């Protein structure tokens, strides 16, 4: 994975998380839904870091 690909994926994750955070703040997501999404993003980040190390 190139540095540019890595940066693109990180930016996409950040954008997604911010949009979900807004939905949570606006009452469109429950605490449980937001927690599950947060955990999923953490999993994606771990996988991305693993790919980066490879």
Image (cartoon, rainbow, N blue to C red):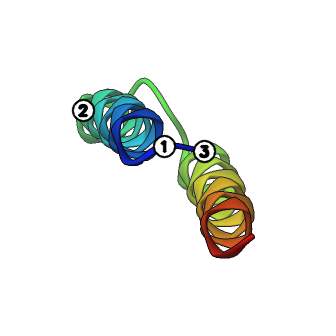
Q: Please report contact status of discs 1 and 3: CB closer than 8 Å, yes or no.
A: yes
The answer to which image quadrant residue 22 occupies is: top left
User: Which of label 3 and label 2 is nearer to you?
Assistant: 3
Q: Nearer the viewer, residue 12 or 3?
A: 3
- Residue 1 marker: 3
Q: Is residue 44 left or right of residue 22?
A: right
Whole-number angstrom distance, CA of label 1 to CA of label 2: 31 Å
The answer to which image quadrant residue 47 occupies is: bottom right
Q: Kindly identify the residue that appears in the image at 39 percent across and 29 percent down.
A: 12
Q: Which residue is mark 2?
A: 22
- Residue 54 marker: none
Secondary structure at badge 1 equals: loop
Query: First in sequence: mark 3 or mark 2?
Result: 3
The answer to which image quadrant residue 21 occupies is: top left
Q: Kindly identify the residue that appears in the image at 31 percent across and 27 percent down.
A: 19
Q: Is residue 42 above or below residue 15?
A: below
Query: First in sequence: mark 1 or mark 2?
Result: 1
Quadrant containing the C terminus is bottom right
**Residue 10 locus on image (x, y percent):** 39, 45
Q: Kindly identify the residue that appears in the image at 38 percent across and 48 percent down.
A: 3
Whole-number angstrom distance, CA of label 3 to CA of label 2: 30 Å
Q: Which residue is mark 1?
A: 2
Secondary structure at badge 3 equals: loop
Q: Is residue 1 above or below residue 27?
A: below
Q: Nearer the viewer, residue 53 or 16?
A: 53
Whole-number angstrom distance, CA of label 1 to CA of label 3: 4 Å
């Amino acid at each position: 994975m190139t540095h540019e690909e890595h940066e693109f994926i990180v930016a996409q994750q950040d954008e997604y998380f911010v949009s979900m955070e807004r939905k949570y703040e606006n009452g469109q997501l429950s605490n449980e839904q937001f927690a599950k999404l947060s955990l999923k993003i953490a999993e994606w980040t771990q996988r991305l870091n693993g790919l980066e190390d490879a």
